[in-house]
Amino acid sequence: MQLLPLIKSYMKSFLITVFASVFLLSCQDKPSKPYKPASLGSINTLAVVMDNELWEGAVGDKVREHFAAPVLGLTWDEPLLNLEHMPSSVFRGTTRHRRAVLFVDLDTVSGAQIQEDLYATPQKVAVIKGKTESELITSIESASEQIISSFKKMELEESQSRFLKSLSKETVLSEKFGISMRLPSVYNVGKEEDGFVWMDREIQKGSMNIIVYEMPGDSFESDSTFVQDIVQMRDSIGKRHIPGPDVPGKTTYMGTEKAFAPYVFPAEVAGKKAVEVRGIWEVVNYPMAGPFLTYIINDKERNRKLVLEGFTFAPATNKRDYMFELEAIMKTVNFQ
């Protein structure tokens, strides 16, 4: 009998066994992530888990004061979040899969924290605790801004992920402005003029709109006239590109509501410094109005201010969710 073939056969079997053992051990070293179901819930809806007694008293009032505060820049008051209260005894089963959850409870400690993907994904669960009702109220006041910001970021991302199901194939923004946006396919280009693009979609009682245009890089340099300059810019663009209904003997166009100054905030969009403007538009010489949201982005590389604006026309209808969708779309802008 020849020994060499036997030795080779033995070594081959030995190496296969060693390799298989190492492979199995390496797989065991990697802990598998526990399965988390997909989260549930409408956009901008918050499950508030707290005892009925707390909900109906001063603590509940404080929760409503912050988490259901009116959204700025709408034609009438609408809450930041729709609050759906439930006692802890009800918070079980698929109810735990709600995307945004707020726990408020008395405990031996005071404070607040935010946990991610606790029962489902994506999910954020904010927990606010206090030793007394007074401490609970203090914790709500100090933590609400951060918690609301965290919820809003998640809701924007959820809204944006839903756009991926059907995106527009329009290339006009890339060709004219060197940008792209995740624009749902239900939006159509309604007007394309020199340095100006208007896209819209029909809704049940009106329309949702996005306009894009450029301003010179040195626009809005004066702090003392900043808001006034923004209003003047909007009105001039509206007069030039966004006409209103035909009225004999009158010129109608979209302008800025004169009775209320717009809200202006610093912002960042696509990694660039920007300004966020919220307010009410109106049609000059005609009874039409609605909310608008504008981002003025400082694009230093191209020595311009790029302006993105979303506005809604939906008479006698709540508009918060329409404006939230427009915000989510505009915040997907990418500079090429």
Image: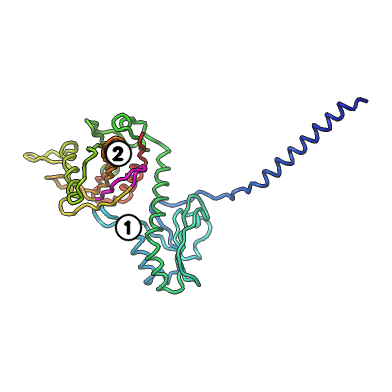
Q: Is residue 221 visible?
A: yes
Q: Which residue is mark 1?
A: 79
- Going by the numbered disc 2, the residue's amino acid type is Lys
- Could you tell me if residue 205 is visible in this image? no
Q: CA distance from mark 2 to mark 1?
A: 36 Å
Crowd band around label 2 with a 10 angstrom C-alpha radius: few (<14), some (14–19), many (20+): few
Q: Residue at x 46, y 53 (%)?
A: 99
- Which corner quadrant of the image does residue 173 belong to? top left
Predominant secondary structure, magenta span? strand
Helix, strand or loop for disc 1: loop
229 or 260, nearer to the observer: 229
In percent of width and height, residue 242 lies at 19, 38
Of residue 236 and residue 76, the one placed in the foreground of this image is 236
Q: What residue is at 59 percent from the left and 50 percent from the top? A: 34
- Say if 158 sits above or below 70 in the image: above
- Mark 1, residues whose alpha carbon is within 10 Å: few (<14), some, or many (≥20)? some
Protein image colouring = rainbow
Over which residues does the magenta segment extend?
A: 268-278
Badge 1 amino acid: Pro
The mark that comes first in sequence, 2 or 1, is 1
